[in-house]
Structures are given as structure tokens and as C-alpha cells.
Image (cartoon, rainbow, N blue to C red):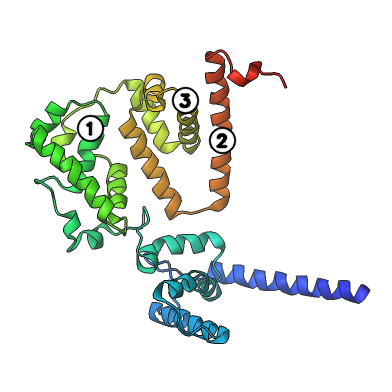
Amino acid sequence: MFNDLLGNNEDNNQSTENQNHDDNMYHETEFDPETLHGTHYDVADFDAEVERRIDAELARRGETNVSKDERANWHFNIRRTLYQEWTGADSDQTVRWEHANSMKNTGIATSGYLNEEKATTDNPLLEPIHGISLRDYAGIAMKMTQGVSEEEIFKAMGIDKTIWDEVNTAWPNRMAQDTTYSITVLYGQYFADGIQNPKLLALQANVSEGGNANLEKLKNDVYFYHELTGARQAAYEYGLDGAQWILDNFGINLADFQSVAMQHMTARNKDWNSEDILHYNNYQQEKQAEYAAKFAAEQGGNLADDVEF
């Protein structure tokens, strides 16, 4: 028994040494700022090693005639394992690396990592519709949600209701056609960037001084953002218009709220930290429960409160 325990301790010590080695390697590794691959190896060599390992594993299993889709399923774990072996990266760094290479590895874009120039070059789905680019389309949607009238927006952009209806049908259709989700991700990034078109910037939404202050707080205070996100969700659950409740009580319209939400989501993707994500999610749930109790009290309590078992 003693020898068994001693052996386990030796295994544990070895495991700790290996972990410390991996941690040190991670901290010493330099990463390419765009791909997040280690700069000490060539990406082509990395890709070739992934394929070699897949071939070896399939041969070991006697599976030589796998489909393209089946082979793609092998890539995820083998690619991830190799990345951690070659860089010593922890799980959070690995997730960031996967986000950075999602277009290459899965064909699906990730918010915060989509290169706008590459995505828009020679992409017919991103050609303007009646002169309205995707960025302009996002800006128009923001202005409408901010409460600016359609007439003012159409006049500023030089379009009419008929043109807008076509534009407002065509862009969502293109998003639905795009299997890479690049258009949807770009739309979200443009929403996060805020309105850029000077014609739209000239159209001022009716926002109170308090609303502007709360909006700035929403951008810069992550706790405040998660509190209001929880409050909005609780409002919806109690039959209230959550977006209208935020506007009535904090002066923040839906477009600005969604814009800030995209900013926080992009920042989370680019600096993925599982502990922080769990912490803020728990905080949001706590706040949602607090606001749910508030709404329940305002409505005379939950219906279930009067039920005896």
C-alpha cells in the first residue's frame, strides 16, 4: 500500500513538473498578433503535422476511407492538442487562438477576429444595394431604433420607402445566404463601431443628459452592463418590454444598448478569460433575480406565491 501511495505521489509530482513546464513555456512563447500561432514555428509545418497525426490515427484504427466531413471532425481535438503542445498555451489562450483562426479552420467568422478588408474583397454579397452599404444599413437601423423618423433618414440618405423596403429585405437575405456568417459578423461589428456615415451622424436622436451619462457608464462599467442586461431579461420574463423599460428608467435606447452589447461581446472574444466570463455571468444572474423579485412585487407577487402544497 505504501509503495502504491509513493508511486502515486511520484506520478503527481511528475504531473506537476510537466504542468509547470507547460506554464513556463506558455509565458515564454511569443504569439503572432493576427493568427495567435507561436512565432517559433511555421504555420504550414503546424498544419502538416495535424494532417500527419490524423493520418496516423486513422491508420491505427484501420479507418482509411473516411469522408471529408468525418475527417474534419478529427481536426478539432488534434489541432487543439498540437497547439497546446507546441506553445504550452492554457485553455483560454487556446480558445482565443481558435477564434482567431475560425474562418480558416471552420469556415465560420467570429466577432472581433474578422478582417474587414479581407472579408469585403471580391465578395459579391457585400456589394451595396441601391447604394446602401452594409455599414450604412447598420447605421440606418441604429437611427431608426434611436427614434429618428424614417422620413428624416430617407431624406438624408436620398432614398424613399420603396427603396428602403427592398434594401431591408435584400440585406437580411444575403445574411441568410452567407454560410460563413461574415455578413452577420460584419453587421455586428459595424453596430459596435457606431454610426460612421456623416449624413446619419447629422440626425440627432432625442437622448437626455442622464441617458448619455448612463450610456457612457454602460460602455465602461462591465458590472453595470451585466446588471442592465439581467434587468432587461427579467422585465421580458414579467411581460414588460425590456428595451422600453431600459429607455424609461436609464434613458438608453435599444440601438445604443445593442451597440454596447456588441462591444462587450467583441472584447470578451478577443480577451477570452473563462474565470471572468463565469464571474460576470453569475453576477448577471444575481441581478436578474433581484429585478425579477422587484417586478414580481410590483405585480402583486408571483402567481405561485399563493399556491400551497
Task: Find the distance from the CA under tag 2 to the CA under tag 1.
Answer: 31 Å
Quadrant of the image occupied by residue 194? top left
> Amino acid under label 3?
Ala
Task: Specify few, some or many for label 2: CA neighbours under 10 Å numbering under 14, 14-19, or 20 or more.
Answer: some
The structure residue drawn at horizontal position 18% and vertical position 25%, both measured from the top left corner, is: 149
The structure residue drawn at horizontal position 29% and vertical position 56%, both measured from the top left corner, is: 182
Q: In the image, is residue 241 above or below residue 278?
A: above
Nearer to me, 213 or 85 = 85
Q: Is residue 101 left or right of residue 136?
A: right
Which is in the foreground here, disc 3 or disc 1? 3
Residue with the mark numbered 1: 143
Nearer to me, 176 or 137 = 176
Residue with the mark numbered 3: 235
For marks 2 and 1 on the same chain, the one whose residue lies earlier in the sequence: 1
Task: Find the distance from the CA under tag 2 to the CA under tag 3.
Answer: 13 Å
Report x, y in % for residue 279. 58, 43
For marks 3 and 1 on the same chain, the one whose residue lies earlier in the sequence: 1
Nearer to me, 258 or 268 = 258
Residue with the mark numbered 2: 285
Task: Find the distance from the CA under tag 3 to the CA under tag 1.
Answer: 24 Å
Report x, y in % for residue 230. 50, 32
Q: In the image, is residue 78 above or below residue 188?
A: below
